[in-house]
Amino acid sequence: ISTSRRYDTQIHRRVTRTVNVGGVLIGSDHPVRVQSMINEDTLDVEGATAGIRRLHEIGCEIARLTVPSLGHAKAVGEICKRLKQTYQPVPLVADVHHNGMKIALEVAKHVDKVRINPGLFVFDKADPNRTEFSSEEIASIRERIAENFEPLVTLLKQQDKALRIGVNHGSLAERMLFAYGDTPLGMVESAMEFVRICDALDFHNIVISMKASRAPVMLAAYRLMADTMDQEGFNYPLHLGVTEAGDGDYGRIKSTAGIATLLAEGLGDTIRVSLTEAPEKEIPVCYSILQSLGLRKTMVEYISCPSCGRTLFNLEEVVQKVRDSTSHLVGLDIAVMGCIVNGPGEMADADYGYVGKGPGVISLYRGRDEIRKVSESEGVDALIQLIKDDGRWVDPP
Ligand code: SF4
């Protein structure tokens, strides 16, 4: 981030080209997109269709599914058909690994984006006796990769579909490990081999990811990837994630540490929070990250103090009541503060404020202006009335 921009209160996103994934546009001119992946077996067409639908209904904008065989690729065709017949088309991404070119070619007919892992799309199988790759061997491997990869790139280009070059820290090709170790540089070089092939074929509907299970590794890899692309004149969007982040609070915090740090630096155009939980649980975390950084506003922003010895009412209870009554008023900022000492100053940016004024008395604010005082028992209703009087109320759905 440039020095002058470090002190801005707005995040300046890295400028990227726009990538179209089934009508959902990704890149710096568009909102940071939320993705997830179903955990049903793709061969279970009914279950997978329901899983995609569940994810979409909760706000997942692009859904991914795994395609480990040709049979799975054909099942994806059936899933797409069912989605179109019974629900609505949802942008789908097929995850293809392990030299799965035939699979990729089949599934590319059905989905909007194909994800390949450069580390598993290789011709240098692990050999315990090998200690190095000569430059001739590397050149020949690259030639064969380009030859093998070209039909997929051509198909994606013809059908105006997208490609994710999705590097994983834990599955780099052996030649990369010899040259760079399992380092961010090795990850970046793995992606760049494929970026250059696509560029030579004039295909640019590409998104890049650099996932690792350790946040510092993914941070370094994404930063280096962005810098390398800048140096070589590429401006592809980035899909962010901390892979295998775990579950519960720690999984969420670890994902946030990686994803939010990069977003705050302006890097990242789509995100996934990978949790060892039902995929639906990932979506609210994604939206909370984006809202907390001011990148998307998809819920009411509540500002409430932690409470202390000065608190004049049961703060947790009141916050919950306010939330229950107003959580559908997306776009508003509502503050609930325990006392007048720090309250009004701290909540100055909120649209409305509910502040403890004295024992049993609440002050209601519109912005920085104190509008009226009411008894504590009427406080929440009076706040709702104030919002209604201002014409900013809508009935809950
Ligand atoms: Fe304590 Fe008042 Fe600050 Fe809340 S706003 S933490 S009650 S001083």
Image: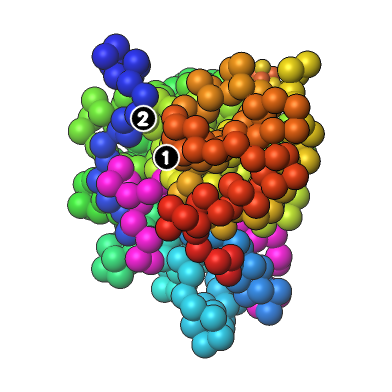
Residue 54 as seen in the image, left or right of residue 61: right
Tell me if residue 56 comes above or below residue 45 in the rendering.
above
> Does 203 sit left or right of 249 as displayed?
left
- Over which residues does the magenta segment extend? 22-45
Q: CA distance from mark 1 to mark 2?
A: 8 Å
In-front residue for pair 87/362: 362
Q: Quadrant of the C terminus?
A: bottom right
Q: Residue at x 29, y 66 (%)?
A: 160
Q: Is residue 41 magenta?
A: yes
| Residue 29 seen in the current view | yes
Density class for disc 2 (Cα within 10 Å; few <14, some 14-19, many ≥20) is some
Circles 1 and 2, Cβ within 8 Å, touching? The answer is yes
x, y percent for residue 44:
70, 75
Ligand 1: quadrant of the figure: top right
Q: Is residue 120 above or below residue 226?
A: below
- Indicate the quadrant where residue 363 lies: top right
Q: Position of residue 345 (x, y in %)?
A: 50, 21
Label 1 vs 2, first from the N-terminus: 2
Q: Which residue is mark 2?
A: 11
| Residue 85 shown in magenta | no
